[in-house]
Image (cartoon, rainbow, N blue to C red):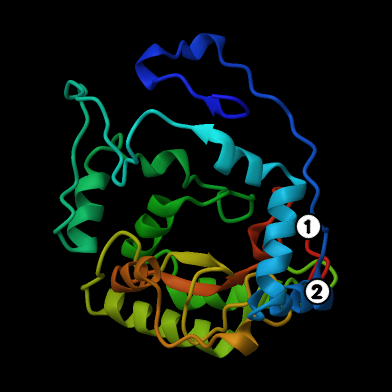
Amino acid sequence: MGKFKVMKPVNEVDVSCVIYKEEDIKAPHLTGFLFKLFVKMLEAPLIGSLIVESLKKNNGMTQIFRNTVIPEEPMFRPVFPSQKPEVDVVLVGEDESPVDRLETALKCLPQYDPSLSFQADSISSFRYWKIRDYAYAYRSKLTTPSVVAEKTISIIEEFKYDKSPTPFLISFDANEVRKQAEASTHRFEQGHPISILDGVFITIKDDIDCLPHTTTGGTTWLHEERSVEKDSVVVSRLRSCGAILLGKANMHELGMGTSGNNSNYG
């Protein structure tokens, strides 16, 4: 077929013999204002398509798409081979409420033993508390979400974890955290915590919508182009379980990397 490359049918491919070739990707490395300008150029009616075609051609994508024959029909939905049910695996119903799903998952964990975390000298020694440690402490009246909130806020403000050049949080509102903690504390005082996540502090990555914070994706401009109207699905489910949303966690700009280093925030 001349210059065309014909791929093998999938049932004839020996996966153990497949070798991945490392390609030299030719693409600009941009951050900040230059990245924003580049996006604007890509969205322009004429010049944008020319840039995309140039990038595809320089990286061999045009040749791959136009000169490769794939024998199978396009598969629009993934098809997985049937599998036998796994032993000791509990399926959580998709139609159940977040609280019910959480309770089902909790039953799959080993029995919780508070003596492993709470000892006579536990107040003076450092401990990395896990979710069930917080749940036990709240229900045993050893502390409250409001007390934990004040300690957390003081640490963030003292060490400037929400300020450049090395922030932990891109967006943080102490009053919003206090408001959530007070509501959680009230639920415990009334004896009606929502779930095991009630009063547990969780940070949300800055590419996930979480009111009242903006979503920047680690950039300095995304929030100017896109406003946040409501919580994302995962955030709304965490909130419905009583979790306290601390703020928006720093991330690599638009997630385009694995190091987590961010030239805008640290």
Kindly indicate the quadrant of the structure image that contains residue 50: bottom right
* Above or below, 210 relative to 71: below
For the residue marked with disc 1, what is the amino acid?
Answer: Asn
Compared with 131, 243 (above or below) is below
At a point 63% along the width and 17% down the height, the residue shown is 19
Residue placed under numbered mark 2 in the picture: 32
> Does dot 2 land on a helix, a strand or a loop?
helix
Q: Which residue is mark 1?
A: 261
Between 264 and 76, the residue placed more toward the observer is: 76
Q: Provide residue 28's location: percent of width, then percent of height.
A: 82, 58
Left or right of residue 45: residue 227: left
Q: Please state the horizontal and vertical placement of residue 48, each as a whole percent of the image.
A: 68, 72
The amino acid pointed to by label 2 is Gly
The circle on residue 251 is none
Q: Position of residue 143 (x, y in %)?
A: 44, 68
Name which quarter of the figure residue 179 lies in: bottom left
Instruction: Name the residue furthest front.
Output: 2
Measure the C-alpha gap from mark 2 to mark 1: 13 Å
Task: Indicate the quadrant containing the N terminus: top left, top right, bottom left or bottom right.
Answer: top right
Q: Quadrant of residue 71?
A: top left
**Left or right: residue 263 compared with residue 216:** right
Q: Position of residue 16 (x, y in %)?
A: 51, 10
